[in-house]
Structure formats: structure tokens, C-alpha cells
Amino acid sequence: MLKNLHQKRIIKLFRYDPTTGEKGYYDRFEVEIENESKTTILDVLFQIQKTQDPTIAFRYACRVSMCGSCGMVINGREGLACKTILGNIKRKEITLRPMNHFPIVKDLVVDMDPFFEKYRQALPYFDSSDDNEEPAVIRPDSKEREDIGLSTECIACGCCVSSCTMMYHHPEYLGPAALNRAFTLLADSRDGLYDQRITRIMPSCYNCRLEFNCTDICPKEISPTRAIKYIQRCALKEPFRQTFQDSQTVEDLPAIEKQVKENPELSRRKFLKRATYGFGAATALVLGGVLASATIGPSIRKAPKQWLRLGRLAQFPPGKVKTISVQYEVIDGFYKSQMVKPVMVYRGPVTNPLVVYNSQCTHLGCTVHWDETKQLFLCACHGGAFDINGNVNAGPPPRPLDRYAFKLEDGDVLVEMG
Amino acid sequence: MQEDLKIQYREPLSKGELDENRWRNTQVGMWAWIWQRISALAIILFLGLHLTLTYKPVIQFLLLMTVTFHAVLGLRVILLDFNIVNVKYQKALIAGLAALGIVLFIIIWTRIY
């Protein structure tokens, strides 16, 4: 005999009496199991019912995880009682509690009517579409068949709905089980109820927040999250699909479809509607484009350069650097502003060539000033220094001082700013 | 004849109600969902702090951390939404993208300082 994890196990069972109608409480039972690796929670419940308390209530039918009747919350995790083996539970104390989000009938039994009501809302049945070839052939290796995969194995146990916290926050949410079933039929090309089904489930499919609780606990290892994501992607395509204009009940729909096909008036109206929208959209685009370019155009256009007078050539003695403060107007988009900038004029020795330096330091743009004693252009910000020819002498500047274009006109020195 | 007993169903339990194991069995997917929401609130708080008290490296560090965290989890949601990554890899995505997030965080932080 295999050694059990514990000698005795403590079972805490949720009790609720429908005749008294109080909040419910936990009953404590002690059980001693011979071979834990071959005992399920359902077996434990049978033992308690037979030997200790015959009044406990729980659901079961097949006992082999095929019917989905025995869903409950075992130590905080949803699962089937007939599938959960005692030997796999490490904790000595086992808490058994009914599933969430369903009204409790008695002890571990919940009312599954709300579950099936939501299931029905998603149209969980197959209705062949009119234009199916007989027999309809879906290849096993087709994308459609692989997409659906094993999601059809759902046994409607309700564990996924119990584990999803969104069911509590959104009472109208159809839930993972209903949406999973809807997915298996939406992905099926033989089915003819796509429009009705997608209309019913689309508002609800956005309530999934990717908690993945449903995928984690499903006893059949189905992923309702995968199904819901598929539905959300279908919803993206919805506005571009041909659909019926009005939403009718399922029985009326074939009649409407016939009406649309036979009545040319309806299709003429459709054409006119489309033409009006199309023309309106085109007008809006053209007008919008013109207005937009008029609005932002000035800001993209480059400001024109201007020539400014610095002074007479004689004012700049050779071998010396002179700093002149220039004032000019700048138009930036719709904004006119006055700019005041210093420029340094250096007239070199021998042939006396003229150079007009930009006072902006090439490191991060601070203003440099000419230091006569050190014979350097100094930048106060980070310690940059340039020699008299504008080359970098010290500090972080990466390149020499920029120069302005200039010209001589009738003995005047003019510099190009802007 | 017995009188009909008055039967009253109990209000549905919500997840974690009357359950002492409520957080014990929470899987990593649910944690990712919770942390995404918490980090969103943290970003609002740190952003407000950062805009009022600028140039403080501590606040900048915290803000960058929460933004990277939130961005990494958000990327996971986008990848799962459009089926770029199959839903069965959702746990692996958390680990993988978290590693990417840490690398990016280190790169960005060392570039600034």
C-alpha cells in the first residue's frame, strides 16, 4: 500500500439550509482514507455521507468526468470532484465550497439555470446554411477545423464561469462557456446562423479581460480565452461584412432575406445611401485637406533669409575680434518675434580676410564670448573653448564654431541671418 | 399532508467570498491582470509627482520602472489579442517580456545617467 500524504484529512464543507435561509457556514469532518492516490473528492463525499452526515447535498452522475455535474471549488480552485484525486492535494485541510456566481440550492448544489440561460442566448445549436453542398466536407487539416480544435469537448460543468471574476462585475456577460460554444459554431463554415449569433454575443465578448482563470481550471483543458479572442477578432471584421439591415428574431430572418432579394426598391435605397456617404466623404477629404494645408502650411515653410548691416569695413581693425549685437525680425509660422543675437567679426592678419562667427556654442547652444586676455572664445556652460580661428581648443564641443555668410557692399559689411 | 416548505436559494458567492484559500491558487495570468491595473494607478501617481518635482532621479527611476512594467504587460495583451502569439504561451510571454523589459530598462537608465 502506498504511503499517504497525511494520516487523517480534514474536510471543511460549506453548508447551507434552504429552509432556514441564513448565510451558510462550514462543517468540519475528519476522514481517514486507505489509499489516497486512488480516492477522489467525490469518493470522500460518499464516505462522509454514508458514515458521518447523511444530510450533505452534492451533485454527481457519471463519476468519470464526462457529465460535468460535480463542479465545485476545492481549496479555492474550481474543478470536478470526480476528477480531483486526494493524493494530489498537499494541504491537510480541504475546503469544499459550491461554485461562484450561481444561486446556492443546498450545500454544494447550485442552481444551473442562469448558466444554461446564458448558454441559450449564444445560440449553441447548429443550423445548416442554405448554400451547403451535400454532404458538406470539412477537411481535418483545414484551418477551420484546426481553429475549432477540441473546444467542442465542453461538458458545460460551469467551472469556467465560476472562476471568471468578470461574471461578478458584469451581470450581462455571457461567460466563457457560452462564448466558447458560440466560437465553435462561428468558425464552422457549414453553419447558417453567423449573423444572428454574432449580433447576440458581440457586445458581451469585450468583457473578457484576459484573466485566464477559465483556461487554467477547465477540466477538459479547453481555452475559452482563445475562443473569446477569436470572437473579438471576428467583431473587428463586422463593420465590413454584408449583414441584414434590421435585427429580427431567429424565426423571422429567412423571410426578411427573401424580401431583400425580391424587392429592388430596397437595393436602390441601399445604393443611394452608399453614394451619398461616398460623395460626402470625398468632399470632406478634399475640403479638409485644403484647410489643413492652409493652417499648418506657414509653420512648415522655411523663414526667408535676410541681409543685415553690421557696419563699415573700417570699423573692424585687423587682428581683432569685434562683437556686434544684431536685431532682426523672425516669422515662425504665425508668430512674429524680435531676435537679438551677438555675432563676432574677426579680421585676420596679413591679407585681412573677414570671418563672421556664429556665437552659438557647437556643444549645446550656449552663447560664447570673446576673451581678449586668453584670446579664446569661451563658453560658460560646460567649459568649451575655441581659438581665434574657431577651432576647438578645450572642452566638450564636437566641431569648430559655425560661420555666417557675409558680403561687402559699398564698403559695408552685411551678414546673412535667418 | 405536509405543508410546502418555504425554499429560499442563497445569494451567489463571488470568487474569494467565504474562501480562506482565495489567493492561494491564483495563477500567474490573473496576477498579470491585477498588476497591469495596479501599475496603471502607480503611473498616474508617479507622473503627477514627476511633473511637479522635476529633475529628481528617485522619482524618475520609479516612473520609468512602472512605465516599463505596464508597457511589457500591455505588449503581452496586444500579442494575445491579435493571435500573434498563441494563447497557450501566455505564461511564457510574461517571463519573456519581463526579461525584455528589464533589459530595456537598464539600457534606458544607463543612457540617461
Image (cartoon, rainbow, N blue to C red):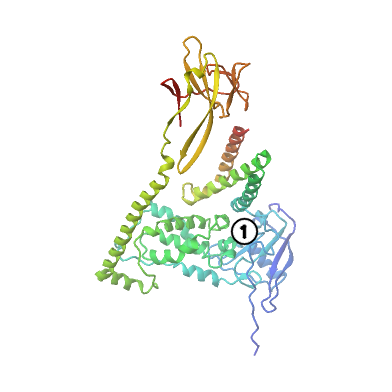
Q: Residue at x 35, y 71 (%)?
A: A253
In the rendered image, residue B91, in percent from the top left (x then y), is placed at: 57, 47
| Residue B7, horizontal then vertical, whole percent | 64, 80
Give SS at disc 1: loop
From the top left corner, tell me how far across and down residue A60 is, in percent.
59, 68
B3 on left or right of A242: right
Residue under the image location 48 percent in, 36 percent down: A329
Looking at the rendered structure, the number of numbered marks drawn on it comes to 1
Q: Is residue A205 above or below residue A316?
A: below
Q: Nearer the viewer, residue A369 or A383?
A: A369
Q: Residue at x 51, y 70 (%)?
A: A116
- From the image, tell me which residue sits under label 1: A84
| Residue A222 shows up from this direction | no
Farthest residue, direction top? A350
Indicate the quadrant where residue A284 lies.
Answer: bottom left
Q: Hey, which quadrant is residue A92 in on the image? A: bottom right
Chain letter belonging to callout 1:
A
